[in-house]
Image (spheres, grey):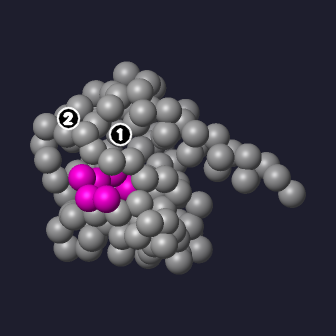
Amino acid sequence: MRGTQLLVLVVERDPHVRQLEAYFLQQAGFQVAFAADGRDALAQAREQLPDVLITEVLVPKLDGLALCRQLKQDERTKQVAVLVFSILAASSRAAEAGADAFLMKPLAEQRLITTVQSLIEANRRKATSP
């Protein structure tokens, strides 16, 4: 059990960015989990049902866009909000894959936190609407 903290699952290759994301998200009150690659992220998402999954496009074993597609096609995980966070200008490809949001690198703390919070709020609204 994760208690009352909202869970953010992060798939990030760069250890420095991963560390910063963890710090920013934890400071904002989120519980943070990490996946080593896209396949690991898919397995963890199916098991833990995170509130938000943040992925790069270029992650090993299953790229971030394929990961997003699989999450959105799976009845159990389709409600997981997906944020694609990349150095690549891939916002339209991310949207086509079903991503709920896209952010370009470099990492900006306030932009990251605001985006994650708005994704969670949007999911709450969807869950309570008839």
- Residue type pointed to by label 1: Val
Residue under label 2? 19
- Residue type pointed to by label 2: Gln
In the figure, 86 relative to 42: above or below? above
**Quadrant occupied by the C terminus:** bottom right
In the figure, 70 relative to 11: above or below? below
* Whole-percent x, y for residue 35 in the image: 26, 55
Residue occupying the point 36% across, 75% down: 66
* Whole-percent x, y for residue 122 in the image: 65, 46
Does residue 46 appear anywhere in the picture? Answer: no
Element on which disc 1 rests: strand
- Binning the other alpha carbons within 10 Å of mark 2 as few (below 14), some (14 to 19) or many (20 upward) gives few
Residue 75 shown in magenta? no
Along the horizontal axis of the image, is 56 left or right of 113? left
Residue under label 1? 32
Residue numbers of the magenta segment: 84-89
Q: Quadrant of residue 26?
A: top left
Furthest residue toward left? 15
Element on which disc 2 rests: helix
Of residues 117 and 93, the one drawn nearer to the viewer in this rendering: 93
